[in-house]
Image (tube, rainbow, N blue to C red):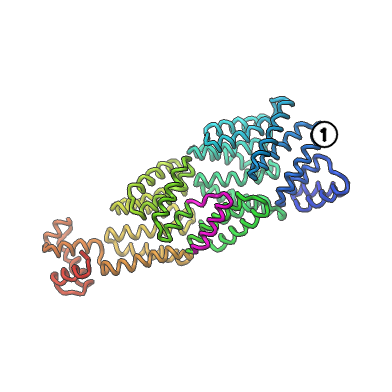
Amino acid sequence: MVEVDLGRRAYASEAWLEAYERLSAADRREALGAQDVGLLATSAYMIGRESEYLVLLERAYRAHLTAGERLEALRRAFWLGIGLAGRGDVGRAGGWLGRAQRLLEECGIDRVERGYLLLPVVFEQEASGDLEAAATTAAEAATIGREYGDADLFALAAHEQGHVLIRLGRGKDGLRLLDETMVAVTAGELSPIVSGIVYCGVILACRDASELRRAQEWTAALSDWCDRQPDLVAFTGRCLTHRAELLHLHGAWAPALEAARRAEERSGRAENPAAAGEACYRRGEIHRTLGQFRAAEAAYREASRNGREPQPGLALLRSAQGNVEAAAATIRRALAECSEPGRRAGLLPAFAEIALAVGDVAAARGASDELSALAQGHGDGALGASAAGVRGAVELTEGDAAGALVSLRRAAETWRTLEAPYEVARARELLGLACRTLDDEDTAALELDAARTTYARLGAVPDLARLDSLARGARRETHGLTTRELEVLRLVAAGQTNKAIAARLVVSERTVDRHVSNILAKLRVSSRAAATASAYEHGLL
């Protein structure tokens, strides 16, 4: 009995490894009772022994049933079904959930356990694509949890309802429910496994809603929760993956890569392939932005093996490798398969970028318009910044450089507020190109230099190479002439006088005089005729 008492105390203090070892030792001497087997099962789960957790749950179920404790047995059957479903063992999961339903009917339907058995229905409705029904069923389960004062049930149901509402495009209502559930989990009102489920579920939902500030806040809370439990293995893989994503966003790419690698290892120990797949995908994203394309491809493939579709990362990798047609086909297929607003918002920026790369400006414009519509009502968050950046890129390609400046300034400022240096640099690169189009070479140089400095600091090799290519192309193709100077040169070559050029361009004749002087100096010629000959010789016209 002494060992059992010590095991219970260790469990209460969240010393999971000690609880597992002491309760296991006590069990070897004399079989534990059903409640203590449940404690041992939870301890096994928390240290990453999920297979043993399921075996112990089944044992606890049978012990409760033998003792005539049918409601306790029902709960064990429910968690067995949920655990098996999470491992993809659909047949056995359905069998255990069926047992739980039968026990509920034997005990009387009007019990809090009815709310728990609504949760698998929610998951089935989500899987079939009936999100409205899933939201309604989750709301019913949450109401039962509230009525019976069952904090675990309410948190599980409400956070699932919030996530579904976000996927339906009703972000404000969804986020309100997520915030409410987080009050319970951070106050320590939930059981250990439910706490981890809700932490990870809420962070995932915040990501789907592009609510980076909330995701960052709850990831910090999850990290603190994990750190308070040194023996914890379960949920730490997810936690490290979320941490890797935020480190990547904030420009700490080496620590992000290390966190992603540790997340893979922890997820493997916890027998959680879904979490491992997410960690692999995150590692692929970091390798891709670093220009480590072979490592990125391997990571995306590993993510796919674990059931995580590697999009839009793999499509962007193909584009960066120069295979834009394959990239376009892949991202087009991924977007066509996706109907949920929140998930489409994650694909649309890549779709627009790749569409511009293949010259399909109309498709990019359509993606930009849809993304802008999805961003309405989200304030100045990541989704709004992403929409503004895509809109600016499309406007620039369409020839509306002035409009692009407005959109890109908004994107850069919002990303700066969110402390996302790489995204700021990408916006500033486009700002530089827009300024160059408008003949503001000084500002263009400042913006492009700022982007280059950030790319160099982060180690964004592909982006640095692109800027170098742009610089070489500009020097080779225009001999340093601005867009407006090229326009003046074409009119000079056509035989127009400075006065006629001024009238044509609606500028002063003095401005045209200055442009012509700059052209002669840059081409290193002394006359208009020589400038015309040089322009034809170098293909400037």
Q: Alpha-carbon neighbours of circle 1 within 10 Å: few (<14), some, or many (≥20)?
A: few
Q: Is residue 175 above or below residue 16?
A: above
Q: Residue 96: x and y, percent? A: 70, 36
Q: Residue furthest front?
A: 91
Residue at the spot of label 1: 66
Question: Residue at 79% across / 33% down in the picture?
Answer: 65
Q: Is residue 315 visible?
A: yes
Q: Residue 534: x and y, percent? A: 19, 71
Question: Residue at 57% across / 47% down in the picture?
Answer: 203
Q: Is residue 438 above or below residue 348?
A: below
Please state which amino acid type lies under the numbered disc 1. Answer: Thr
Q: Write down the region rendered in magenta.
A: 292-311
Q: Is residue 116 above or below residue 237?
A: above
Q: Main secondary structure of the magenta part?
A: helix
Q: Is residue 540 above or below residue 125?
A: below
Q: Is residue 436 left or right of residue 246?
A: left
Q: Residue 221 lies in magenta, yes or no?
A: no
Q: Residue 135: x and y, percent? A: 55, 33
Q: Residue 345: x and y, percent? A: 45, 45
Q: Is residue 380 visible?
A: no
